[in-house]
């Protein structure tokens, strides 16, 4: 009976290890944008929209001419953009509406956190800088992370134009 119990324990441990590896692999693929499912569950979408609405209403100086009902209609119609905003939020950012592009008909969101979010620090600018790094290599690059999140990387010149929308200037600025 003892050999059978040991065999059972070892297969359980293997199964748990396999599940952990699967979970780690999914997290890795999701983080680097290699998984195609870029949609939030309905509860997560509603929670994010409520958070974005609260931030919108608390910072009207960023978008005094825009109306929230117009924004929420666009967000609900585009689940991939909502997913990208959630990725910004999950890494410690504070995405908020900062304008409207009349050519594309899209609302412009920017991370309005006062500092570089904790989930996006200690990164190289791009893959070339990452590959050139010999010691203390960071986990990745800011450009690759932005691409995996489905957002554009904001250059310092764009950050300066954002200061006209808001009184923000990140403490940790890349560009």
Image: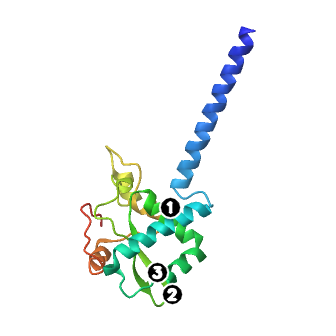
Disc 1 target residue: 148
Name the secondary structure under disc 1. Answer: helix
Q: Which mark is residue 105?
A: 2
Name the secondary structure under disc 3. Answer: helix
Q: Nearer the viewer, residue 33 or 11?
A: 11
State the quadrant of the N terminus. Answer: top right
Q: Which mark is residue 68?
A: 3
Q: Vertical placement of 50 versus 166: above or below?
A: above
**Label 1 environment density (alpha carbons within 10 Å; few <14, some 14–19, many ≥20):** some
Q: Nearer the viewer, residue 139 or 93?
A: 93
How far is disc 2 from disc 3 in space, using C-alphas? Answer: 15 Å
Q: Residue at x 45, y 84 (%)?
A: 67
Where does residue 6 sit, x and y in percent of width and height?
68, 15
Where does residue 18 sit, x and y in percent of width and height?
63, 35
Q: Vertical placement of 172 versus 167: above or below?
A: above
Where does residue 101 sit, x and y in percent of width and height?
44, 86
State the quadrant of the C terminus. Answer: bottom left
Q: Residue at x 39, y 52 (%)?
A: 131
């Amino acid at each position: 009976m003892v050999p059978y119990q040991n065999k059972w324990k070892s297969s359980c441990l293997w199964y748990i290890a396999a599940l952990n590896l699967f979970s780690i692999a999914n997290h890795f693929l999701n983080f680097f944008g290699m998984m195609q499912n870029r949609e939030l569950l309905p509860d997560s979408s509603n929670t994010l929209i409520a958070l974005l609405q609260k931030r919108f209403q608390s910072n009207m100086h960023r978008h005094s001419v825009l109306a929230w009902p117009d924004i929420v209609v666009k967000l609900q119609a585009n689940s991939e953009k909502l997913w990208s905003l959630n990725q910004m939020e999950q890494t410690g950012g504070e995405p908020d509406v900062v304008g409207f592009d009349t050519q594309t008909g899209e609302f412009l969101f920017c991370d309005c956190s006062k500092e570089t979010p904790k989930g996006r620090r200690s990164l190289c600018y791009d893959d070339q800088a990452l590959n050139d790094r010999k010691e203390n290599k960071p986990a990745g690059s800011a450009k690759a992370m932005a691409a995996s999140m489905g957002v554009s990387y904001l250059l310092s010149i764009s950050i300066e134009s954002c200061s006209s929308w808001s009184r923000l200037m990140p403490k940790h600025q890349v560009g």
